[in-house]
Image: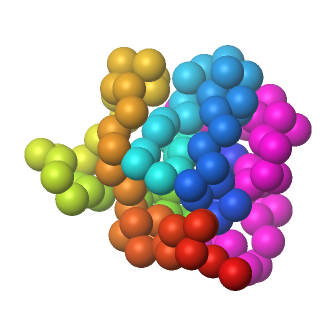
Amino acid sequence: MAYVIAEPCIDVMDRACVEECPVDCIYEGGRALYIHPDECVDCGACEPVCPVEAIFYEDDVPDQWGEYVTDNAHFFADTLPGADGPLDSPGGAAKVGPTGRDTELVAGFPPREQQA
């Protein structure tokens, strides 16, 4: 099990969660942040500091955002557009830095400024 970042993070990316994570398992995409499901130690430090309440324990993700459970895993397991291969488990977000890439679900989400 792991924590998951859902839709409210898209185009916000406050990064308070990144600062709180003791194991550096929150990676930066182009429009959202992603928690590595294998590197997360389920400490929950990220959840209370998220200003948009986008972080949930995997079993507690609201039904409306259930697809983000698998989407977070896809960020690491799939080859994203513009990448040479999957990110896999590099052992910490600081080693990788901002990727500038997102999953298809996040990339296809309408920009926040265009939403009513």
Position of 71 relative to 110 (above/below): above
Residue 78 seen by the camera: yes
Q: Is residue 9 left or right of residue 63?
A: left
In terms of image quadrants, where is residue 46? top right
Q: In this view, does 96 lie to the left or right of 18?
A: left
User: Which residue does the image show at 71% across and 30% down from the upper left?
Assistant: 16
Residue 56 location in percent, x, y?
A: 77, 53
Residue furthest left in the image: 84
Dividing the image into 4 quarters, which one contains the C terminus?
bottom right
Q: Is residue 38 left or right of residue 8?
A: left
Colour pattern of the rendering: rainbow
User: Which residue does the image show at 60% across and 44% down from the upper left?
Assistant: 13
State how many labels appear.
0
Report the span colored magenta: 38-67
User: Which residue does the image show at 52% across and 68% down from the upper left?
Assistant: 111
Position of 10 relative to 3 (above/below): below
From the viewer's side, name the closer residue of 77 and 17.
17
Position of 97 relative to 30 (above/below): above
Residue 41 seen by the camera: no
Residue furthest right in the image: 48
Q: Does the magenta stretch include residue 45?
A: yes
User: Which residue does the image show at 82% across and 62% down from the upper left?
Assistant: 60
Residue 32 location in percent, x, y?
A: 52, 51
Residue 114 location in percent, x, y?
A: 57, 75
From the viewer's side, name the closer residue of 49 and 69.
49
Q: Does the magenta stretch include residue 58?
A: yes
In terms of image quadrants, where is residue 26? top right
Q: In this view, does 80 lie to the left or right of 59?
A: left
